[in-house]
Structures are given as structure tokens and as C-alpha cells.
Amino acid sequence: MTRCWISFLFFGFAAIPTAWAEVADWVDYPIVPVPATAVKLTDQFWAPRIETNRTATIPSSFAKCEETNRRENFRIAAGLSDKQWLGDYGFNDSDLYKVMEGAAYSLMTHPDDELNGYLDQLIAEIAAAQEEDGYLYTLWTAPADQKPPQYDRMGIRVRNQRWDNLQHDHELYNLGHMYEAAVAHHQATGKTSFLDIAAKSADLLVETFGPGKFESTGGHPEIELGLVRLYRETGRREYLELAKYFIDVRGTTTKDKPRLWGEYCQDHKPFLQQDETVGHAVRALYLYAGVVDVAALLDEQAYVAAIDNLWHSVESSKLYLTGGVGATGAGEAFGRPYQLPNGTAYCETCAAIANVMWNHRLFLLHGDAKYIDTLERTLYNGFLSGVSLDGTHFFYPNPLSSDGQHQRAEWFGCPCCPGNVCRFVPSTPGFAYAVQDDTAYVNLFAAGKAMLPLASGEATITQTTRYPWDGKVQIAVAPSAPDAEITLKVRIPGWARNIANSDGLYEFADADSPQPEVTVAGESVWQPADGGYATITRHWEPGDTVEVALPMPIRRVAADERVEADRGRIALQRGPIVFCVEHPDVPEGHVHNLVLPDNAELATQFESDLLEGVQVIEGEAQATRYEGDEADPVIVAETVPFKAIPYYAWAHRGRGAMDVWLPRSMDAADPLPLPTLANRSQARASRGAAGNVGCLSDGRLPPNSLDQSRGIIHWWPRKGAEHWVQYELPEPTTLSAVEVYWFDDTGVGECRVPESWRLLVRTPGNEEWTEVDSPSQYGVEKDQMNRCEFTPVEATAVRIELQSQPNVSSGLHEWRLEGE
């Protein structure tokens, strides 16, 4: 494979001249993406989001970087500030780099002198923080008396020299993001100020790392991606070769890395021996994206075979319906095959971005539409839920079920996701089109115009559509060369071909949908066997238009029976959009007790005044609840109306329950519990509590203290502190006992059963809290109810006061009351 050199724009190429590299033929991807700068979207879905990213997400993220000392840390390292280095992690530098990268993309389409000048200031401070030989890591370079007192805690560890803690310190991870930002800035402005810093740093890495030199790699892949981009921009082949070295040294022991770091760091076995996707999801997919780059640029066919196997590992058993990846918060990792829990799904926003990066590269390598199918699924669902409609709040995990404990935040202690959103959103137009000689690929559908560089000359493609709400798409092709023969390949999404998932992890449970239609001048051109594309080769003339009709009926989706969490359940999908049912759209806000029978009729309509305009699905479900005697309750059901909204738009209307997967029958139902004193009371918790206090009285006991699928409250990261939770009783009641089920995520997180606790009550006419008399025991056993009996007392409220163990926090699953 040979192709004329052009440079990357985040995930795509940007045909921008550079003074750094000579134009030359070299091995590369066979298919070239059309850069975002050549695509002008005018739709009502992505164009407004890109503008929101420019006007809200990037400015607010820069403000957070200022507020949290991320900018100041560079000034400290440069000797320009006498403040204390601030932060919990040495990789804080990378957060600023990512926002800067996003700002550079913004400048490419929206010139802004103020933003340009601000970037110049930041770059000058970064240059001042860089050591003479090119080393750049603010925590190490900061003067000793300005280093933080927690230098031996959390993500920051005592160090004796550079590179001595690559497993954890993220020196190379930081630099990978810096290289990507520097390339973006060079492409946006033509200035070399940031690129000079990156090249100076990369030259140090080339001098330092490799066989017979310092033989190691980074615990968090990213440097590989950065080095490849820097190679493309500068033509310096040693950067590409170093990226390959960092891949090949993984999973091996060396004189400088005498032990393996394990699955979490993608260092459990050599890459070419890997056959199952495991470990930290973001680290895995960043590595895989870098591997595909190196495979394409060095024609490494062994890499290709290995990466294809790993893709099937994900697609066949580890991919959520939303395109999210990462089943567990334990190590932010992939789970076992078919381990896809909903309430505890991790599905980190960064992992969704990484999944898009990986699948886009695989398409460029193989040209198969199935990779764009997964990219599109992730883009519209698993990624988009990670950022609020106003662009200023973010999810870290993106679960598929919630009791109301999830809420987007402005920033995080580890804010990798906001910065990634900043750089990802303006790049989305770059996934829409690609070219190969005189073949033009139309991969995504959005109204707008694109300029495609084909071998015979430039061609303009104009799309007219309301996608993703409507499957009708008009594609006008206007080549610059008269009567040019161009092959147009229009992707026909898998969901339009009755394929829910290319490897069978998901299937449509209902009857086949109407078939897509593709016509030119009234003539059908759709051939279903053509790799997911409608292929049209012709001499195009002005006015030639392709009419695409992708039917969008409401589809019921079922998961492979081996996915225990989804067994007996269905999800709703229309077009590329996965839907969910959320608390404001059902009577009394109850969601988990709903059953959606297979024969329930469903309808859809567009609601322009809901959540900035969304398609909704409406119908009737069965709301289940227990009735009768507590010793022998029966399940009853009543028909209730419900509305489903796009999954990406959930959690914008207050805290409450949400589900993507709904039971199909009573066998899988989760009925409302019998009325109890606890669930008729008003629950409250002390400052810092996370989660939905309503889960304490929902009657749903977990299988163990570690489980998080049924709702918890906790006070992490407030450690070693006193906390309280209380019930305001509906009327004065004589209480005689309580039962408490503690949350404890030993081995996963930092919540443990409390060191101690006690039970207090408020009595009628008395506002003071007093401890109950003669408590039997204040138990702190895991995996069971802890019962405490006491002298009966008439109370108007009851409170648990607990003391967390040192250096950890606490939480509860369930709290039951016994009274008369």
C-alpha cells in the first residue's frame, strides 16, 4: 500500500501543507478519511453540538484547568510561580493538553484571535516548564519545596529519578496527549511553537528508550498514538519506530521492567499473543488504536491478525448495546465474556471515544461497513450520554440502569472525560466520508456539504436529511472534472439490514423490517451482499442525486441468552438510537417494575420541545407490584402509559430511575415492594452522600455487600468521617428493631463497613436526637442484614450515625424498620 503523505486530524487526515515534512510515498492506510475541516455540517443534530462544544465545553474546561491549578503547575515547573503544585495525579498535565487540542480544532473552523492568543500564552508556559533536554512532566520538575505533601499517595509516588515509575506515573501518557495537541495546533495555525516542544520531547524519548537503552513502556497506552501523529506531521520515521517498540515491549520483562504489570496496564502478555480483550478498557482500546496505526504504516500483518481477533472478542461478547465498553468499575475494566451488567456498567465516556477511534481505524484498514456500524452505535449512544445537552456537565461511567444515583458533574478528581469530549466533538464530521482513489465512501448521514479529494479531482457531496430521526437521505454528487467516473459507496447500516450486531451478540426480536432502498434516477442500485455498502459507479453529472430510504420502525432488541443481566428482557431501538425509560415519563416515577410484553403496541413521534428535540416512543406497559400478606405476597399488574427517550438524553430532568432493558414477562419483573414503614418515610443523608436514598427502602436485597446493581448510597471519597442517614416517619410510630445491609467494595474501591454506628430517634414534641435504649448489637457484618433490637420507643424520626474506618468511606444498601 502506498499513498501520498498527508497528516492526521485527530482520527482522520488533514490535507494541510507542512514545512516540517517532505511529501513522499510511504505505506499507509488504503482508505483515507476526509478531514473534519472539509466537511461543513448544517444539520440540527451534530452542528449545534459542535457549536456548543466551541462556546461552552472548551471554555468551561479551560476555566476548570485554571481553577484546579493545572495551568499553574506549568508555571511552577518553569519557576514562574511560588505556589504549591496542586493535584492528586501526576497526569494532570494531560488534561490541559486535551482541552488545548480541542481548542485547536475549533480554530480550524472558527478563527478566534482571543483563543489563539490564549493558546500562545499556554504554549509559552509549557515551553518554559520543559527542561533543557526536552523532559516535560511538571510534578517532577517542580522545585522540591513546592511539591505536594501527598507526594507519596494516590496517583503520585515518591520518585528517585525520571522514568522510574512508568507503571503509574503516566509520564509517557502525558506526552502522547501533548504530541496530539501540538500537531493539532500546528495544523490549525501553521505555528511551530508547540510542535517544537513536542519534537524536542520526542527526540529525548528516541534517545532514551529502545533495545539496549531504557527498556520499558508506559502503564497507560497513549504515547503510541501521539508518536504516530508526530511522525505524520514531521516525517521523522524514528517516532513511528519508537511507537512500535512501545507496543512490542509490552508483556515482556526487561532489565528496566523486571516484572509484568498485568492486565490493567495491558502488560500481561505480548500483544501478538493476546486473544481476548481484558483489563482497563481505555488503556486497551488506546493501545489497539495505536496498533492499527502502526500496522498500517509499517505493513505489519501479524498485528492485523491479532487486532482482528481482539475486535471479535469485544463485538461478540463484551460490547454494550449502546456501544459502551467496560463492564466493571473494578479496574475500569472489561469483564468476562457476556458479563454485561446494567446498573454497574462502567462504560466510561473515554472508553466510548476510544472505541470510535479503534473502529474508525479498522474501517480505514479493511473497508468493511461493520466497523462504522459499531462506530455509529457508540457515537449516538455510549459517547453522547457522556456530555450534557449544555456541554458543561459530564458522566464518567454511563450505566444502562439507574436508581437515581447518577448525575453528570462539571469536573472530576480525575477529569479525563471532559478534556476528551473537548477534542472529540469537533472531530465528528471527520468520520462521515472517506476516499480511495476514485471511490468515495459515505459512512455517516448528516445534512451538509463535503469536499472530497479524489484521484480524478475534487468532488462535492451534499447531503439533505433529518437523520437520525428520519432515514431519508438525498446525496448530490458534483465532481469538478466533467463527466468523471466515480464510485460512490453508501453505507447501509446493519440496523437497516436486520443486523443488530455483526457477531450476533444482539438480535432484533421482532419480525424483519422493511428493506432499504437506494435509487439513482429512479433505478434501484442496492445490492445487499456488497460489504454493507450500496456501490454506484457512473459518470456523474451536475444534479445527479442518490435517494436513500432507510426504514426506521421501532425495533425490539434481545441479547444473547448468555448475557445474564438481559435475559428475559428487551431494549428499544429506532435507527441508530437506543432508547431508555426514565422516571419523568411513567406514573409515579417507577421504572424497574415495568414489563413490556412482546405484543404491546408502540408508536413514535418527534417532540421538538423535549430535551432540545427528540424522537420518543410511546406505548403501554404493565406496572407490577406486590400485594397481600407479607408472608405470601402476590404480584399484580396494571396497564400504564410510558414514554421512552433516546438514551443519550437521560439524567437531564432530575434524579430518578432509568432502564434500557425492560422485562418481557412477569418472570423477569421486579415488582414494587409491599408498603412498609421505611418506604413510606422520607429518607435523607448527610453532606457528601452519593446515590439515591430511596434505594434504602426499595426492598431489593443485593446478593452481597459488593454488588452495586440494585442501588446504594455512600459517602466516598469522604474518608474516616462521621456520616448519618435518617428516616422522617409518616406518623409517630413505636419502633423496636432495625436491619441494615452495609455496602463494602473491598478489592474494588474504598468503601468498607463502618468502624462503629449507633441508632438515634426523635420523639414526639422533642427535636433532640437521643440514642435508643438497650440496643442488642450494632453489627457490621458483610453480605447480610445486621439486626439491632432495642427497647420500644415512639418516634417521629430515626437516624443511623456511623463512623467510617480510617482512610476509607462507608455506604448502605438497605435499611428496614420494625414498628407498630
Image (tube, helix red, strand yellow):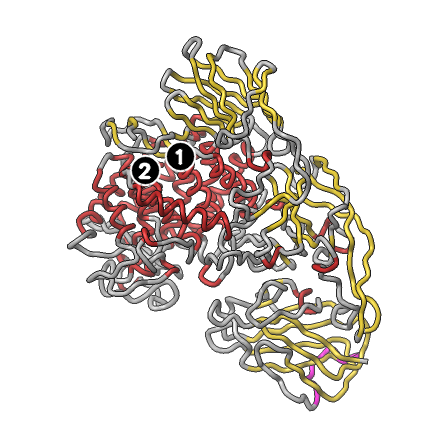
Q: State the residue in front, 611 or 435.
A: 435
- Magenta region includes residue 176: no
Left/right placement of residue 597 relative to residue 507 reads: right
User: Are there few (<14), some (14-19), or many (20+) residues within 10 Å of tag 2?
Assistant: many
Q: Which mark is residue 296?
A: 2
Q: Amino acid at mark 1?
A: Leu
The three-letter code of the residue at mark 2 reads Ala
Residue at image x 67%, y 88%? Answer: 775
> Looking at the picture, how far across and down is residue 156, in whole percent?
35, 63
| Nearest to the observer: residue 717 or residue 644 | 644
Q: Residues within 10 Å of mark 1 (few under 14, many from 20)?
A: many
Q: Position of residue 74 (x, y in %)?
A: 32, 51
Provide the residue span drawn in magenta: 763-773
> Are circles 1 and 2 on residues that touch, CB within 8 Å?
yes
Q: Earlier in the sequence, mark 1 or mark 2?
A: 2
Q: Quadrant of the N terminus?
A: top left
Residue, disc 1: 364
**Farthest left residue?**
212
